[in-house]
Amino acid sequence: MRKTEEKGITLIALVTTIFILLILVSIGINTGTETIEYAKFTDFKDELVLLQTKVNELNENNELNIGKELNENQKSIFNISEVSNIIFKNKTEEQKTNIKNGFKYVNFSDLNNKLGLEGVKREYLINVEYRYIICTEGFSYEGTTYYMINQIDNEIYNVEYNNKNIQYNNESFEVTCTKETDRWKIEVTNINYDGYINNWDVKYRLGEESWKLANGLTFYVTKAGTYYVQVAHDNISLGSKSVIATDN
């Protein structure tokens, strides 16, 4: 009887030990997998930061002609809500079209060789003028697919860059009005701004009418009167000035 009892105790201890080992192995595998996935996500973020810094530099130097035109398949990325909610937020239909047309496709080979960004492993759609970067395939992590640095919590690289465009003392522009036969040419010139903005939106209105978006810094009107002209970029405004369209 004693021999049988000793065998029973040994079997229970063995089963318990195996069960504990299985739990530990499972925990180790899960932890290892999570660590690997986080490392990949960190690598993706680092790549976005590197590319964002380069695009900011290109924007500052007004180097807009990089990459290739998008094909129809690549344009479909604008239909993804995670992307469209960022690049089209508070934009007019005309601005949305301009933003789309400003994107170019750049593969990792060109990013490495032509732009000197060694180690980039993915392909991107880039709009240098608006400083937008979209990863073509995205990266899935913890149930979310990331395409842009703007999606990542606690990542403020592009926000910090944009904040350089806020609160300067020497912000100004000039506006002139010239009569041309049956219309007037209104032109915005000498924009003075210490930030890194190259594309300004010009809005205008006649008296108390609604604001209209001009197609560039020069536009034409056919009615006489006092026009108010505003120069802005997203949430950054240089204020407004008035100009009089008159026959005199």
Image: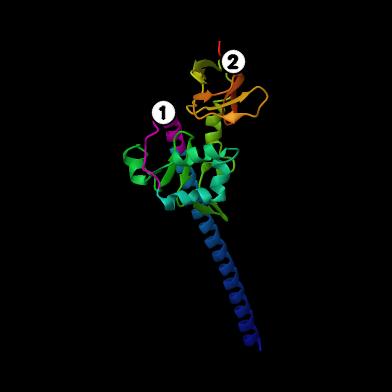
Label 1: few (<14), some (14–19) or many (≥20) C-alpha neighbours in 10 Å:
some
Residue 65: x, y in percent? 37, 35
Q: 3 above or below 125?
A: below
Outermost residue, left direction? 113
Q: Quadrant of the N terminus?
A: bottom right
Sequence order check: which comes first, mark 1 or mark 2? Answer: 1
- Label 2: element kind: strand
- Label 1: element kind: loop
Q: Is residue 236 left or right of residue 196?
A: right
Tell me, yes or no, whether the highlighted magenta stretch contains residue 62.
yes
Q: Is residue 211 visible?
A: yes
Q: Quadrant of the C terminus?
A: top right
Q: Which residue is mark 2?
A: 244
Segment tinted magenta in the rendering? 52-70
The reply to whether callout 1 and callout 2 are in contact (CB within 8 Å) is: no
Q: Which residue is mark 1?
A: 62
Residue 174: x, y in percent? 53, 15
